[in-house]
Amino acid sequence: MKSLLTAAAVAVGLITASAASAQNVGIATSNPGSLFHNIGTAVANAANANGLNTTIQPATSPNQFIPFLNQGGIEFGVANLQEVNYAITGEAWWNGNQNPNLRVVAHLQPLVEAIFVRADSGIMKVSDLKGQPMTDGYTAQNTILPQLSAFYATAGMTRDDVEKVSVASVVAGADAFMAGDTVGFIFAHGAGKVREADAAVGGLRALTVEDDSEAALAAAREHWPTAFFTTLKAGSMPGVLEDGVYIAFPQVIFTHAGVPDDQVYAMAKAMYEQAAVMGETFPPMRAFRPENMKGDPGIAEYHPGALKFFEEVGLN
């Protein structure tokens, strides 16, 4: 009942915001401090720079706002591609509840993730977390447990190898870490909350993938099918103390099948033409490459408005 009330509250908030700005298009994002909130803000700024009147509407996580978007309650959203695919088919935590009206607008830069610990903790690798108190549960953000399991799998571990401390979301997990309740937390590189935690504890260490073999990647993909490995250079992000390998996966801007073609076309065009604005708003988006906007959507379909723009600029 609590989760239903929470979802209803999110929907009411989004409906109220949409009614108050009927001439705008909205982008649903996660909470302030999250990566998707930062990205949504950057995309909105790019859209506004191109003349598309755009506002962001935060919710706790995509698994809360996706059904609302599927019903046409808001025009756009930010999520990772695997979650959109699961939402369409009703797999995993969607428990058979399908969201067939979702359509992809464009791929963003990959989301790169890590488990963060204090730099002075003595924890140097994922397997050092065994028996330690770690964030878990993620009751309002269903994508995180399988992503956490994917990270543990690269070290031959499961969630049962740590002492589980239940939190609602990644933002709440970072707060629990800063309060001293856990030795680590999972978050996306580049998010504002990671920078906050880095400053709060006097420095973070981002734990790298312990084993970057094909077998380890296969083990990670058992939990998160679109996962892949990528390398970050020392100093490129808070907590990246040496060159290392991390888990990454595709993330997208998506929409509803009923959103007018011209609005989706305008959003795709704005992202393509205003990449510099997105990078200025949120520096990690400097990794966004307009030429990669039309990536593999998995089982999802692209919106016709996006396909029209891609055809015009030669993205096939």
Image (cartoon, rainbow, N blue to C red):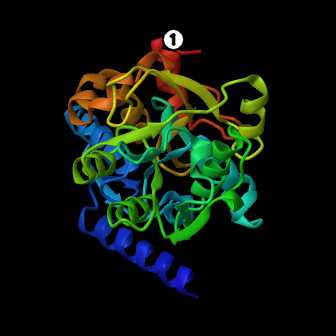
Establish if 79 lies above or below 291. below
In the rendered view, would you say 305 is above or below 78?
A: above
Q: Residue at x 43, y 62 (%)?
A: 173
User: Where 219 sits versus 37, above or below?
Assistant: above
Q: Which residue is mark 1?
A: 314
Of helix, strand and loop, which one carries label 1? loop
Count the labels in the image. 1
Where in the figure is residue 9, as x and y percent of width and height?
Answer: 42, 79
Q: Is residue 197 left or right of residue 78?
A: left
> Residue 16's spot in the image, x, y percent?
31, 73
Quadrant containing the C terminus is top right
* x 53%, y 17%: residue: 311
Give amino acid for label 1.
Answer: Gly
Q: Residue at x 40, y 56 (%)?
A: 28
Residue 100 visible within the image: no
Q: Residue at x 28, y 25 (%)?
A: 274
Q: Is residue 174 visible?
A: yes
The spot of residue 118 in percent (x, y) is 37, 48
Residue 95 on image: x %, y %: 75, 67
In the image shown, does 6 or 249 lie closer to the viewer? 249
What quarter of the picture does the N terminus occupy? bottom right
Characterize the local packing of mark 1: few (<14), some (14-19) or many (20 or more) Cα atoms within 10 angstroms: few
In the orientation shown, which residue stands out farthest toward the front?
Answer: 122
Q: Relative to the observer, which residue lies in front, 103 or 262? A: 103
Tell me: 184 left or right of 280.
right
Q: Is residue 314 above or below residue 220?
A: above
